[in-house]
Amino acid sequence: MKLIDKDLMSMQEVRELVESAKEAQQELTRMDQAQVDRIVKSIADAGVRNAKRLAQMAQEDTGFGVVDDKIIKNVFASRGVYEHIKDMKTIGELRRDEEKGLRVIAVPVGVIAGLIPSTNPTSTALYKAEIAIKSGNAIVFSPHPTALRCILETVKVIRQAIAEAGANENLVSCISIPTMEATSSLMHHRDIALILATGGSAMVKAAYSSGTPAIGVGPGNGPAYLEKTCDLPLAVKRIMDSETFDNGTICASEQSIICDEDMAAAVQAEMERQGAYFLDENERDQLGRFILRANGTMNPEIVGKSVRTIAELAHLDRVPKDARVLVAKETGVGRGHPYSNEKLGPILAFYTGTDYMDVCDKVCTILHYEGAGHTFSMHTKDEKIVDYFAKRVPASRIMVNTPSALGGIGATTNLQPALTLGCGAVGGSATSENVGPMQLLNLRYVAYGRKELDEIRAEIPDCSDGVCKNSVDLSEIDIDEIVKSVIAKLKNF
């Protein structure tokens, strides 16, 4: 009976939160761009002020990651996102073309349901609040239960910042009794216009099957290619920095590395020099049995944990205490090859290929198994190699010479700063972009007439007798002269 009561209470809470959010959003629609921007800036400033405290709470609640790195993520989700979107035109008329007779007007979607994961709880809440309000919307969060306390505290910070900016704090709210029924009720609520889902595959699939428009993201499982022209010490440093950042909890982080066979020894030596520990065959099998559960899903005990903790949990006694990343040599992909899966911890699979074409085939195989449409990274000085992979790899983000985790979210690249990374159609996502304000609004087009029907009729060729009378007569074109002209221009070029 108590369980039923909790479910009913949570569902009632959802109804009240959505109703209040709808009223707040209607108030927001009467504000201009400057007023909206003032609210977003207030949230960004508050996020930076509270970055350390919220980071500490997130680590305490979930046991994931590193406090110092979570501070960076909170600042990134606050100030970094704000700096990128602050000059975006998102309210009212966006553009006007008098010559074409076209006007484009931004239309907020309304109230958004925001699903918050345990891996990046406080930073995701800050980021989603900013992009939702920037695009004229309200947002109601459904928090991961293990991160409830820190998410609620983040929402408290956000709501205070909204109030200080003179707006209705119900623009951002959060379920305080998190149950599956509450999340389902939120996603199916008639006044929820859009679901912004960041979390596990099951939750994302539930969002897409709810009948409510949704933007969800699939799992990341990004391979990293160390090509023969790369600066090897720098490439390895970038990968190590990325994989150890917040203990690998960012979904764009490298999950495997791959190089040409003739580079394998040099890559391993450099990685070991920078703190990687290569597992022997027995250790590889032992950790492999721990990485995945019996049903083939990732063991949550490894997520966001340090190498030392993972080694203790998996009873790997020989791993040095100062090891930064665990590396396992892998030859296959799929069931029976646990290192080919997303791991979200400082664990890397190590693959080799005969040449760059073989490497590309293996990268595609890995991503099609898990992580299609997400992220791939490469370290090279050869632009032809970049072009080759960019045309073939099923990833929405191709990171070149940068830590993949930070590059993918837009921290070390000029991508839209985001903690929700679209995977496109190949990954089962509604967008392939890093999600920002422009994905959270609709565009209304005002189009002025420029032709009459009689003009359109007059443009249709008359071919009633087999010859189009008002079309170009090809017999009058001197093909030889055209060819000579093109050849001459090519010679001059």
Image (tube, rainbow, N blue to C red):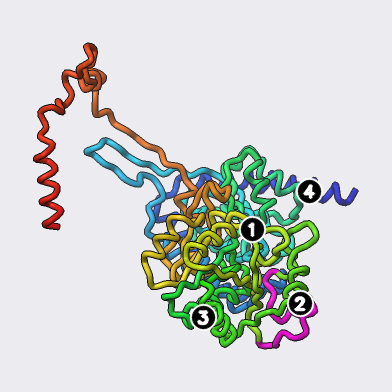
The secondary element bearing badge 3 is classed as helix
Q: Is residue 243 above or below residue 367?
A: below
Q: Is the residue marked by circle 1 packed among few (<14), some (14-19), or many (20+) residues within 10 Å?
A: many
Q: Nearer the viewer, mark 3 or mark 1?
A: 3
Q: Residue drawn 62% across and 61% down? A: 155
Where does label 1 land, which residue? 116
Residue 282 is labelled as: 2
What amino acid type should be assigned to the residue bearing mark 4?
Met
* Extreme-right residue of the structure: 1
**Does 327 appear above or below 110?**
below
Q: Amino acid at mark 3?
A: Lys
Compared across the picture, whether 49 is left or right of 5 comes to left
Q: Which mark is residue 237?
A: 3
Residue 281 - label:
none
The quadrant of the image that shows the C terminus is: bottom left
Magenta span of residues: 303-322
In the rendered view, tell whether residue 52 sits above or below residue 201: below
Callout count: 4
For residue 352, side relative to residue 382 (left or right): right
Residue 199 location (% of width, % of height)? 65, 57
Q: Amino acid at mark 1?
A: Ile
Q: Label 2: few (<14), some or many (≥20) within 10 Å?
A: few
Tell me the residue that label 4 is attached to: 9
The secondary structure that dominates the magenta segment is loop
Identify the residue shown where x is 32% and y is 45%: 95
Who comes first in sequence, dot 4 or dot 2?
Answer: 4
In front here: 403 or 207?
403
Single out the mark in the foreground, 4 or 1: 1
Give the quarter of the image for residue 475. Answer: top left
Front residue of 460/131: it is 460
Q: From mark 2 to mark 3, how far is it between C-alphas?
A: 27 Å
